[in-house]
Each structure stands twice: as C-alpha cells, then as structure tokens.
Image: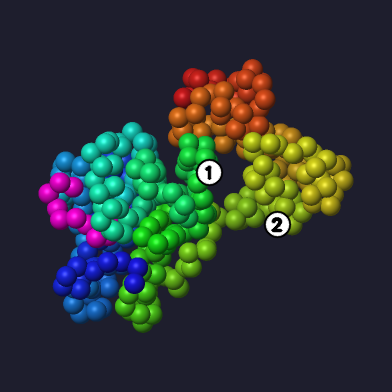
Amino acid sequence: MILKPDHDGIFTISFLLLPEYAMVGLLSAIEPLRVANRFAGREIFRWQLLSDDGESVNACNQLAIQQTQSIQDVETPKNLFVCASFNPEKYINETTLSWLKKLYRKGSVLGAMDTGCYVLAAANLLRNQRFTLHWEAVPAFQEDNPGVEISNELFEIDKNLITCAGGTAAIDMMLHIIQAEFGHDLAINVCEQFIQSGIRQKSAKQRIGLAARLKIHHPRLLKVLAKMEANIENPLSPSELAEHAHLSVRQLERLFRSHLDKSPTGYYMQIRLERAQQLLRESHLSVAEIGIACGFSSAPHFTRSYRNQFQLSPSEDR
C-alpha cells in the first residue's frame, strides 16, 4: 500500500497550493482520481485543496480554484502533496513548515509536485531520501541543497515520500498509485480515458532526448554533447571531449561546424552561460558562486562572457 486510507477505507489526497503553482500538474493528479471513481462505481478517492490561510491561490497561469481550505481548519491529512512551480522559496513560511513537520511526526505520507521539494527541504524532511522534481529546477536546487539525492525520473516513491516532476508526469504517478491500490485493470481503464497508449514507467525521461531536441543523430557528436551537459562546473578541453568520442580534435571541430554551426568551445560556452542564467533566476547563490558553478574561475571573464551572450551583465539580469 502506497497511500494511507481514511477510517472508511477511502483515500483522501490533499494538495497544499503555493502561489504560482503549476495548474497542469494539479489537474493531472486529480483527474485520474475522478475517473478511477467513475470506473470503480463508487468513491475510492477523495481530494481537497489547501492553502496557508484558506484563501484561493493564483496558479502561474493567473487562474485560481475557489474551493480551498486553511491548513489549520482540516483534520491531519494522511496523504499530502505540496504543489509549487515558480519561486517556491518566496512563499515558504514557518507556520507551514511547522505544520509539515507535525504531519511527518504523525506518519502522514508526504509528497511534492514540480518544485514542492523546496518546501520539504526547508522543513528538513528530505534527509536520506531519493526524490525528483522538475528538470529545469534541478541545477538550482542542487546548488542550494548540496548532498541531496535527486533522480531525473518522472516520479519517485521512497518510504513515506512521494515526489513528482510535475506536468503530465502526475498522470503517470497517479496511474501507478491506482494500479498499486486497486489493480492493473482499473489503471488501464483510467489510462485509456486520457488517450494515452500506456502507463509510463517512472524511469521514463523527463526531457526530450538530445537527438530529438537538437535534431542531431550522429552518435559520436551526441556522446560529446551529453558529456558537455554533464560537466558544466569543470569544463573539459576539446582534446578530452574528442578522446571521449574516439575522434580527433579536427574531426570534432568539423562535426560541430556541420551540425551546430559553432565550434565545440563556442557551444560549450553557450550551454554554460544558459545554466548560469538559470541559476541567477532560480537560486540564491551569489554571482561569484554561480560563475564558479558554471566553470568560470575568473569573475571578470564570467561577466564579460555573459554580457557577450545576453547583452547585459549577470547582476543586471538578476
């Protein structure tokens, strides 16, 4: 059993909404529960929306669902997901953190969708646990929370912790839960209602593969590109990259010019600066720390390179 049932055997799932949460993730989590009730012919799931003060919460699309209750006015939730997206740290407060710690002590199943892990981390509830979050938020989260174990999977279930990358991955997470609690047939019936060809496993990739994303199919070039993305803080030299793909430096240069119209060094600089921009906007690291995290040993070199790429300095962009 993954979730904890109420006394009447029904599973109530609570969603704590932070301002700017992603509505697509919330609805992708709730709709499979609604359809499961329909096919079961009875209520097997309930859900409720919570906020700090009971007021409705604007999602990042500026829409709000009105049926929201205060965390202080509900019975202790047995199954709770923190739903966040943009700027999660901006909306963390001590009242909510204390409440989450109380739920943890009482043995509730806690979860997070998209960037809800920021709240669980602030409550110190991610210790020695494997979890996931939206791929775009991973670099900033890792820099802010060194030593944590983040997976790149669609969702993770570890003891009393359930985390999901958000978006439509919430459908797959809930289908997995439905299957675990009520069997394969019900999960498949629910899946088909969403015009899906199957239930994605949690190990499915969050991002489109490099080949599809860049429209590149040369295996050795893809190998180099993946190596670059995995080595942002300590960039490799062209000779090291070429050796990794069993190419000469000249062959590597020709491949990059032919497929990307850039030199290996120029492309590597681009992805390092894109990572720096992401960290500037989503982390609390200083400009100097971000420069180091993106492979720049010199602050002036970082600033100059950043300005050349984005036409403004790192400080101005932040």
* For residue 163, above or below residue 300: below
117 relative position to 212: left or right: left
Q: Residue furthest front?
A: 105
In primary-sequence order, the first of circles 1 and 2 is 1
On screen, residue 242 versus residue 223, left or right, reads right
What number is the disc on residue 286? Answer: none
- Which picture quadrant has residue 19? top left
* Residue placed most toward the observer, 259 or 184: 184
- Position of residue 32 measured from the top left corner of the image (x, y, whole percent): 31, 67
Q: Amino acid at mark 2?
A: His
Is 12 or 308 nearer to us in this picture?
12
Q: Which part of the image, by quadrant, shows the N terminus? A: bottom left
Tell me the element at label 1: loop
Q: How is the image coloured?
A: rainbow
Residue 263 horizontal/vertical position (percent): 75, 37
Residue 217's disc is: 2
Identify the residue shown where x is 20% and y is 71%.
10
Tag 1: residue type? Gly
Q: Residue at x 47, y 52 (%)?
A: 128
Q: Residue 32 or 312: which is nearer the viewer?
A: 32
Bounds of the magenta span? 71-81
Q: Is residue 36 left or right of residue 252?
A: left
SS label for mark 2:
loop
Q: Which residue is mark 1?
A: 147
Question: Horizontal placement of 107 versus 247: left or right?
Answer: left
Q: For mark 1, does the 10 Å Cα neighbourhood hold few (<14), some (14 to 19), or many (20 or more) residues?
A: few
| Residue 289 position within the rendered picture, expressed as x and y whole percent measured from the top left | 56, 27
Question: Hey, which quadrant is residue 190 in on the image?
Answer: bottom left
